[in-house]
Amino acid sequence: MKPKVIVYKKVDKKVLDFIQDTLDVTYFEKLDSQTYPVFLEELKEAQGILGSKLKVDQELLGQAPNLKIVCNTSVGYDNLDLSALAEHGVMATNTPDILNDTVADTIFGLILSSARRVPELDQWVKTGQWKSDLEEKWFGVDVHHKVLGIIGMGRVGTAIAKRAYCGFDMEILYHNRSRNEEAEQKYNATYCSLDDLLKQSDFVCLMTPLTPETEKLIGKREFELMKETAIFINGSRGKTVDEQALIHALKTRGILGAGLDVFVQEPIEKDHPFLAMDNVVTLPHIGSATYETRFKMDMMAAVNLVAGLQGEVPPNLIKVK
């Protein structure tokens, strides 16, 4: 009898076929108020689950006595309680590396669109306001030859540094838990304290994972250290930033602008102050959202799932603690 698993997100038929070759799959394109009770019933027998964003904690694990593996289709895994997984003897996997370039492209898109006011000017043209030469009040700022500060110089941070250094002749500063020799050697990146990075950077790019140590890492004090001409970019998680402090910094022009792909609450509330600000570019958490990359992520998660339930060590096993 094939091991029973649950796939709780929409995946390509090729991914589903790959899993179904060796496992008994219950498939939900999404979890909502209608499908979640059915999911919980199926969970009682499931040995594996594959998807993203589902909170896997003591409560959920208590309803999954046969669970052996949880496969996230993301590089981040702040939705997983690693201590609870370890206690229950459940493996966890993610999908690192495969999305590095795609996310870096998105982040650089935020840098460029924030600096050159692309969304704002797009609307200015489309609403018929372009009737003469562009006035100075609509000018943006240069990106090339500026200072980019990257907080969290992991693989995605390194891919961002590559684009900045090789494509835009930017000076790279970075702050990380450990030194990144590749970034230092290839992209002339300079390791520095968080405070020095904030004081010197024209663009501050936050790319840390969400952990208890990084929650609200950037708040009132940090925004006050930044240049008034600085642009803040967040491609990590919404909770790594004190949103109220960012709103204040933007409203008072303590910083020039922001480009955001993540928010504390997602989807963002319809009346959120960010949505009424001309100096903020907002994206709906699209960092890895291309068909090509999402397919590869789902297939990588599927490989992890099948390997884990065939007695092999999954290629992307997370160290639980």
Image: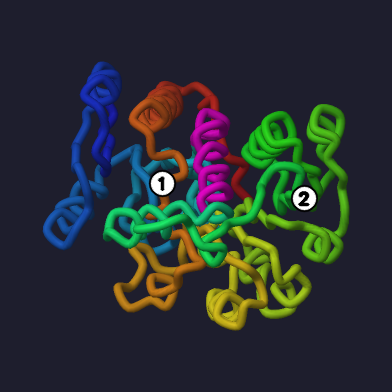
Position in image of residue 165 (x %, y %): 74, 35
In-image side of 285 versus 315 (left or right): left
Q: Which residue is the site of mark 1?
A: 286
Distance (Cα) linking label 2 and label 1: 25 Å
**Would you say residue 111 sits in the magenta stretch?**
yes
Q: Nearer the viewer, residue 259 or 303?
A: 259
Q: Looking at the rendering, in which quadrant would you find the N terminus?
A: top left
Q: Residue furthest left?
A: 34
Residue ID at (38%, 70%):
275
Residue ID at (87%, 48%):
191
Q: Nearer the viewer, residue 248 or 129?
A: 129
Q: Nearer the viewer, residue 68 or 19?
A: 19
Dot 1: within a 10 Å radius of its alpha carbon, few (fewer than 14), some, or many (20 or more) residues? some
Position in image of residue 320 (x %, y %): 60, 46
Residue ID at (81%, 27%):
186
Q: Which residue is the site of mark 2?
A: 147
Position in image of residue 177 (x %, y %): 79, 51
**Would you say residue 119 sits in the magenta stretch?**
no
For the residues carrying marks 2 and 1, which lies nearer the camera in this image? 2
Image: magenta residue range: 95-113
In-image side of 252 versus 31 (left or right): right
